[in-house]
Each structure stands twice: as C-alpha cells, then as structure tokens.
Image: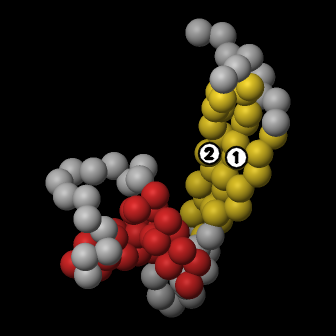
Amino acid sequence: MAIIHDDIIVDFNGKREKWSSTMIVNGIPEGDKAMARTVSLPVAIATRLILEGKIALRGSVLPIYPEIYNPVLEELEEFGIKYSHRKKCSAPQMVY
C-alpha cells in the first residue's frame, strides 16, 4: 500500500484556505507493488502523451501545469489510482 497525503494552505487576496488531497493505492497480489504503480504509471502516461503531441511543453518541466496533470490524473483513474480532495475555507495563520 502507498499513501500520499498533502495539506496546502493557499491565500486568495487575504482569504486563506486549507486544501487537502489524499491518494491510497494498493498493490496487485502477485503483480505490481503500489509504489511501482504510483511511480511508473504517471511517467508512462506522460511519455505517451508527449509522443502523441498532446503535451506540447518540452524540456525539464515540473508537472504543475494543467496540460500535464489533468490528462495524467484522468487516465490514472482507469488504473484505480485516484486522489480525493477537500477544502476547508479557513486555514490557520502561519507563523514564519
């Protein structure tokens, strides 16, 4: 089993929100391990999308662009890999 959980605090013109996303993936008995699936499938999907011309970005690019992450996340759902998202409207104040 692989679990990924992110908590992100965002600020929209003074309105703070806490966004959380969680992904839980199980391995396949007698098959691929959960960690192998969560690492290899996104890379394989993105590579195919680049070769098909569906991702135009080139070079070393972080997957922070909707052009990359939307189709990859969408296809990952076909493999049973899905994030659940939730948003809390008020986030704690951060002290730096």
Quick one: label 1, few (<14), some, or many (20+) residues within 10 Å? some
User: Front-most of 3 and 84?
Assistant: 84
Q: CA distance from mark 2 to mark 1?
A: 6 Å
Label 1 secondary element: strand
User: Do residues under tags 2 and 1 come within 8 Å of each other at their CB atoms?
Assistant: yes
- Where is 93 relative to 33, above or below? above
Residue 22: tell me if it is visible: yes
Residue furthest front as drawn: 13
Residue 52 x %, y %:
26, 81
Q: Is residue 60 left or right of residue 24?
A: left
Residue 20 is marked as 1
Q: Is residue 4 left or right of residue 64?
A: right
Lower sequence index among marks 2 and 1? 2
Q: Residue at x 54, y 83 (%)?
A: 79
Residue 24 x %, y %:
65, 65
Residue under numbered circle 2 = 6
- Where is 39 relative to 89, above or below? below
User: Front-most of 14 and 72?
Assistant: 14
Question: What is the three-letter code of the residue carrying label 2?
Answer: Asp
